[in-house]
Image (cartoon, rainbow, N blue to C red):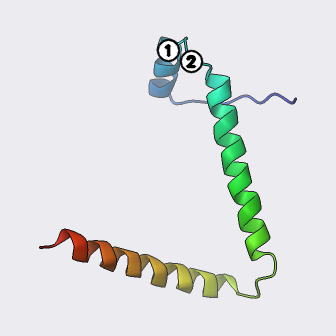
Amino acid sequence: MPNITLSLPDDVYHVVKTHKEIRWSEVARRAIVDYAQKLSLLEKLTEQSELTDDEVMELDTTIKHGIARHYRKKTIP
């Protein structure tokens, strides 16, 4: 299995070094595997798409505005 090297901000590095009981390489490996699986799924879902980048961004904006409107209604009495 290949190895990688990660750079961490100083504050995160301090937390990691303080908690030696945690297998940080396993935490990082799982996070990377999970993210890679999500990217693979996204690629499979979009490989047949004929949308342009501009159309995707317009759809993204429309969806986000709809979600924001939905949650604003729930939080405003």
x and y, in percent, of residue 72 in the image: 25, 74
Q: Is 74 rendered above or below residue 22?
A: below
Which of the 4 image quarters holds residue 56?
bottom right
- Near-viewer residue (59 or 76): 76
Identify the residue shown where x is 47% and y is 18%.
Answer: 14
Q: Is 59 rendered above or below residue 23?
A: below
Identify the residue shown where x is 79% and y is 69%.
Answer: 44
What amino acid does circle 2 point to?
A: Ile
Cα distance between the residues tagged 1 and 2: 6 Å
Q: Residues within 10 Å of mark 1 (few under 14, many from 20)?
A: few
Mark 1 and mark 2 residues within 8 Å of each other at the beta carbon: yes
Identify the residue shown where x is 77% and y is 59%.
Answer: 40
x and y, in percent, of residue 23 in the image: 62, 19
Q: Is 10 rendered above or below residue 60?
A: above
Q: How many marks?
A: 2
What amino acid does circle 1 point to?
A: His
The residue that label 1 is drawn on is: 19
The residue that label 2 is drawn on is: 22
Farthest left residue in view: 77
Q: Identify the secondary structure beneath mark 1.
A: loop
- The quadrant of the image that shows the C terminus is bottom left
